[in-house]
């Protein structure tokens, strides 16, 4: 009864009633959710939706990241990973090195997914990317290849004078299985032109994903928050994603990414606070009613907060990852790998059921154990 009274007195009670009766919330509602300090009602609401959609399950996968090169033609202000060609710290993996890493991860960790992205390399011919995919399919044929952000696809289209459809069809033919959701940053033009003026626009990012969905490639979506944007920009970002998902149903997961300022041109900013992280995850769960999953990327969020987020709308903790570079170069202090038993323990400690999934959310292993 006391809880009921508390919720009724909440400044977001009208939104609470809307969500509970399965009505879609508006952009104004989402903005009010960002402005509220009632984190308890927000969490309760997000958790209700999370349990309706995904029961008590929490997903993870066994994956490995390979960032094939950090050589990039542009210089985004929030990026600590990229280097110009010839600059100190620039690296390029050969296709042979990439395959060796993939094979070792399959043999030692039994990965089911490779997550492969890189900078916008000025010199590689298009065939290099096709050859990499073909070599990987030959070396680790059972592993799902989730490769190239929409920003890379847009870069290829411009550089090699092809349409998005032509690029994606050729990459799919070579072995591409799905696209990751990076490069979305914040869609709003006012922010984009300040933090990443040299790369794909929001419309281009959306068009790449729409084309991928039309070709049967599923994708994920991200949002980099906690830098120069405000709440209106975050809501605008979510709106554009919800609209595309209404059209295509091709997104599987939304992954809010907390900005890490170290070693970037925006290092005067602090990292977003824990409350900001939880709010953003919870509101994403509430607003994106057409997304099946919300993921906490533990690398950026930190392990403790990622665990807590399982009560704030999150149903996916990403995976074992192995050798993440992009956010560790921006000061992430999380480990570069999490073992399966560590992931399962984190999940079980909050009373959820760990489920190992493949990239397309097929359950591979369900651990029906309640608490440790
Ligand atoms: S975020 Fe991507 S496109 Fe931007 S500088 Fe870094 S690697 Fe290059």
Image (cartoon, rainbow, N blue to C red):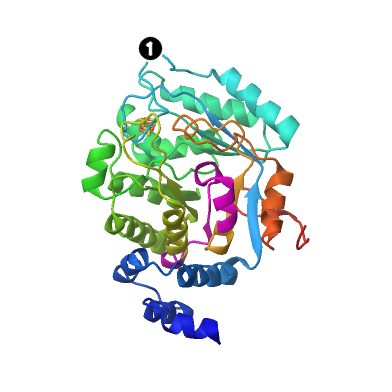
From what the image shows, is residue 255 above or below residue 330? below
Direction front: furthest residue: 2
Q: Position of residue 17 (x, y in %)?
A: 43, 82
| 182 relative to 194 in the view: left or right | right
In this rendered view, identify the residue nearer to me: 189 or 168.
189
Q: Quadrant of ligand 1?
A: top left
Residue under numbered circle 1 = 86
Q: Is residue 116 visible?
A: yes
Q: Residue at x 59, y 69 (%)?
A: 51
Magenta span of residues: 286-308
Q: Position of residue 156 (x, y in %)?
A: 37, 31
Q: Position of residue 343 (x, y in %)?
A: 68, 48
Q: Position of residue 294 (x, y in %)?
A: 51, 57
Quadrant containing the N terminus in the rendered view: bottom right
In the rendered image, residue 294 lying in the magenta stretch gets the answer yes
Quadrant containing the C terminus in the rendered view: bottom right
In this rendered view, identify the residue nearer to me: 149 or 50.
50
- Give SS at disc 1: loop
From what the image shows, is residue 261 above or below residue 47? above
């Amino acid at each position: 009864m006391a809880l009921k009274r508390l919720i009724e007195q909440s400044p977001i009670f009208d939104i609470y009633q809307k969500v509970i009766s399965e009505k879609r919330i508006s952009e104004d509602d989402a903005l009010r959710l960002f402005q509220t300090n009632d984190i308890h009602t927000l969490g309760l609401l997000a958790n209700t939706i999370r349990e309706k959609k995904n029961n008590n399950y929490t997903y993870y996968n066994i994956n490995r990241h390979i960032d094939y090169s950090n050589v990039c033609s542009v210089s985004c202000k929030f990026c600590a990973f990229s280097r110009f060609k010839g600059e100190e710290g620039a690296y390029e993996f050969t296709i042979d090195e990439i395959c060796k890493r993939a094979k070792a991860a399959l043999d030692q960790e039994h990965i089911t997914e490779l997550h492969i992205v890189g900078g916008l390399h000025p010199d590689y011919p298009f065939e290099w990317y096709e050859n990499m995919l073909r070599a990987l399919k030959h070396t680790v044929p059972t592993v799902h290849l989730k490769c190239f952000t929409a920003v890379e696809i847009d870069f290829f289209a411009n550089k090699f004078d092809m349409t998005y459809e032509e690029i994606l069809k050729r990459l799919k033919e070579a072995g591409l299985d799905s696209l990751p959701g990076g490069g979305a940053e914040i869609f709003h033009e006012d922010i984009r032109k300040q933090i990443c003026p040299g790369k794909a626009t929001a419309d281009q990012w959306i068009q790449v994903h729409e084309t991928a969905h039309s070709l049967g490639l599923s994708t994920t979506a991200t949002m980099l928050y906690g830098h120069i944007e405000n709440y209106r920009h975050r809501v605008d970002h979510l709106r554009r994603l919800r609209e595309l998902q209404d059209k295509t149903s091709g997104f599987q997961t939304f992954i809010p990414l907390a900005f890490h300022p170290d070693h970037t041109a925006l290092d005067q900013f602090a990292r977003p606070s824990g409350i900001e992280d939880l709010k953003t995850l919870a509101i994403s769960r509430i607003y994106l009613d057409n997304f099946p999953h919300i993921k906490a990327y533990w690398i950026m969020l930190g392990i403790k907060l990622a665990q807590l987020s399982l009560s704030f709308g999150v149903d996916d903790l990403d995976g074992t990852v192995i050798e993440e570079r992009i956010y560790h170069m921006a000061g992430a202090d999380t480990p570069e790998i999490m073992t399966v038993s560590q992931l399962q323990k984190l999940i079980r400690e909050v009373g959820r059921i760990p489920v190992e999934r493949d990239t397309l959310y097929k359950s591979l292993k369900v651990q029906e154990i309640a608490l440790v």
